[in-house]
Amino acid sequence: MTVTPRLLIVGPQGSGKGTQGARIAETFEIPAVSTGDVFRANIAEGTELGRQVQAVIEAGNLVSDELTSAVVRDRLAQPDAAAGFLLDGYPRNLAQVADLDAFLDARGENLAGVIELSVPREESIARLSLRAREQGRTDDTEEVIAHRLSIYERETAPILGVYGERGLVDSIDGVGTLDEITERILTALIARGLNPVS
Ligand code: ADP
């Protein structure tokens, strides 16, 4: 039996989930969908969506569930997501978990696994200040980073309890080389019956 790779990657800011998510998606030949990247691309292009979310993102707050879930539903309904997908940065709270459940249930689909990338708080703060210097993201100031981390702990971390009860979570140590961490994730996904393409 083949398991369709419908995957989530969850972790605090600076955990490396964007990088690892892209690698895992490539290995399974599925699209990596990062809600943060979609929003940033829309801001850069000056679209209506970009204008709606810019101030919220710069303040480090969450975009509304309605808007975010609509963006994700549109993306997952595209043909290239039929054979699987990896979501990075969504769901980010319990309401979004319910939205994703409803979307997948209606399609008769389910998640194959949830990768939790864990890193100590000091490590993620150190990585984020490096990224702030390298990439100049407007939401990477010290104050906004602290705010985003506290939202993560309060609103996002609880989703791992829900998925944990469903037996879907693999908790992966996010400290190590990029290759080591990718290997840990792949080992966990293979144990769930998933088959890497490359
Ligand atoms: P990080 O994990 O470092 O916060 P992301 O790229 O995942 O970076 O997200 C950047 C910003 O985009 C978030 O702070 C938030 O404002 C918005 N965002 C991304 N995903 C979601 C989501 N699922 N729900 C609400 N807002 C989101």
Image (cartoon, rainbow, N blue to C red):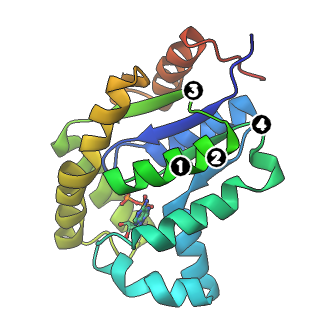
Which quadrant of the figure has residue 150? bottom left
- Residue 74, how many percent across, how many down? 68, 63
- Real-space Cα separation, disc 1 to disc 2, in angstroms: 6 Å
Count of numbered tags = 4
Residue, disc 4 = 83
Q: What element carries label 3?
A: loop
Rounded to the nearest whole Å, what is the CA distance between mark 1 and mark 3? 16 Å
Label 3 sits on what residue type? Answer: Ala
Mark-to-mark CA distance, 2 and 3: 16 Å
Amino acid on which disc 4 is placed: Ala
Instruction: Quarter of the image for the C terminus: give it.
Output: top right
In the image, residue 135 above or below residue 193: below
Q: Which of 196 and 105 is in front in this view?
A: 105
Mark 1: few, some, or many residues within 10 Å (few <14, many ≥20)?
few
SS state under label 4: loop
Q: Is mark 2 on a helix, strand or loop?
A: helix
Q: Earlier in the sequence, mark 2 or mark 3?
A: 2
Q: Determine whether label 1 and label 2 are within 8 Å by CB.
A: yes
Label 4 CB, ligand 1: below 8 Å? no
Q: Residue at x 41, y 72 (%)?
A: 137
Is 81 left, or right, of 38 in this rendering?
right
Q: Earlier in the sequence, mark 1 or mark 3?
A: 1
What residue is shown with label 2?
106
Seen at 74% across and 10% down, the residue is 1
Q: Residue under circle 1? A: 102
Amino acid at dot 2: Ala
In the rendered image of this protein, does residue 179 appear above or below residue 62? above
